Amino acid sequence: MSRLFQFRAACVLIGLFACVLALVASSRLEAQDIQADLDELARTGGGTYRLSVPRMTVANGVVVPEGVTLDLAGGELIAILTDANSAGARMSSNSAVRNGTIRVVSRGSPGTQAGAHAAILIGALYGENASPDRLSAFEGVHDWVASDLTLISDKRVAVGGGLTLGAAAIQVVGGAHRGLIERVTVPDSDVLQGGILMDWGTVGAISSAHVADSAAAFRGGTGYTTHPYDIVVRDVIIGRLTRPSRNETGSYGVRLSGTRDIRVERVAIAETTEAAFRHTAGDLGFEFAKPADRGRALRGIVISGLTVEKAGAYLVRSDSYADNVGRAIIAGYRPAISPIGTTDIRISDVRGRSTRGGSGFGVRVDHQRGGEFVDISVHGFERGVFIDEQAYDLRLVRLVASESAIAAISVEHPSRPPARISIVDPRTMGSHARAREVIVGRSDDVSLTGTVSAVVRVVAGARRPKVPVGVAIRRD
């Protein structure tokens, strides 16, 4: 190789290196400029900021200020996140993000909360509301919109045992309210915790690990919990979320924890490892919520139009149980409200199949008062529908369970039996006897009405079961 050629090659490499440095520098400048532009737009009365390039890299994401719409104009915002709790885009009241892709490239040591290094974060993370007098600027954000988006995050935090924690595509937390999430796509991921997650938040000295201390803070006015409400989610597509599931640590399609007045419509999911849809009261429920939240606790939740190609541990799982409060009661704590809450949740028009071949549950309900499940079809689970311990006052209408390994529908628990369960027009199918069975085990006041296309097995310990005349019954 001639010295001239070597010299020219070196020049080319130096030039390329210089270009890379220039690109990095320009990205950093763009990051500073876009935030400055967004802030200036908000200062002058708000409006729409449109991305002017097809792809822009920003450092530690952007905050969309109040009164501002960030229009990605079909482009991609790449957020290189190194701050522990930053997000691709963080929303304020009366703000919007729409029309493009947000991709989080997670670096450094991200926080373990699902909102840390999420593509979109709405609300205040745990620990950000220091006290009632020192609330985060993001607590209680309202009138926000996230629409026409593709959302990606590669956050991966090792937590031991070969497990990692990822982020949410969209995390809604605390008292965020009056929001709209629509026409959102979440591509395949082996690390995301979930597609759309909504979780209760804390203000001041509230800790799920210390219920009695939290009660003292609540009574003293130095702490309380906050809860997402008045939010609509519709027309969402979620790909294959294959994060491994161990002890309920897998991936979720949509999860609601400690919410009220939420509507979710038309969600298509390719695969989840934990639950396609999860509803729970959360660790503390509404025990330390303000009166407005407590008065509507777990009410007004409507889920409809959920289709799932492959579900892992659960297609749908629902409870209204403040489990940490329940455990504290055993230790002598006296709660203000029952740890098993009352809900009017309505879940309808759900279709899904098991990904595990005869394991998991199509629908499982436990520790819950109230709820209606309508037009739900499940295929290939261990139990198609399982009404488990301390489930009360449920109404199940037109459930269809096929090829269940143990039972199409079972209502039973050996020590804390479910009670007042109404099953209307159930239909079971399968290539073996158990797949066609409705099991009424240890329970109280389980009634089957309408057209019962199943064999009903009534087990010793069932109190006051009601089965229509002419339906085949087996008694054990």
Image (cartoon, rainbow, N blue to C red):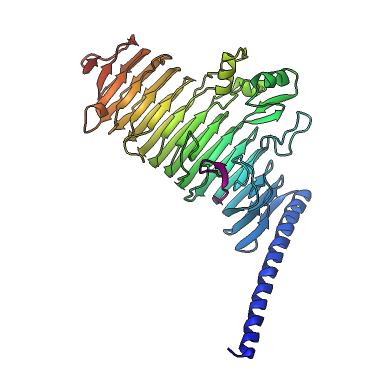
Q: Position of residue 118 (x, y in %)?
A: 60, 46
Q: Is residue 167 visible?
A: no
**Closer-to-camera residue (271/156):** 156
* Rendered-image quadrant of the N terminus: bottom right
Q: Is residue 11 above or below residue 395?
A: below
Q: Report which quarter residue 468 is drawn in.
A: top left
**Closer-to-camera residue (191/37):** 191
Q: Is residue 351 above or below residue 103?
A: above
Report the number of numbered marks.
0
Image point (48%, 34%), residue name: 248
- Which secondary structure dominates the residues rendered in magenta? strand
Q: Position of residue 460 (x, y in %)?
A: 30, 11
Q: Is residue 71 visible?
A: yes
Q: Position of residue 236 (x, y in %)?
A: 49, 44
Q: Magenta part of the protein: which range? A: 152-164
* Rendered-image quadrant of the C terminus: top left
**Closer-to-camera residue (135/68):** 135
Which residue is most to the top? Answer: 464
Image point (60%, 63%), residue name: 54
Image point (66%, 50%), residue name: 69
Instruction: Specify whether residue 378 is painted magenta.
Output: no
Q: Position of residue 338 (x, y in %)?
A: 56, 15
Instruction: Specify whether residue 161 is painted magenta.
Output: yes
Q: Report which quarter residue 284 is drawn in.
A: top right
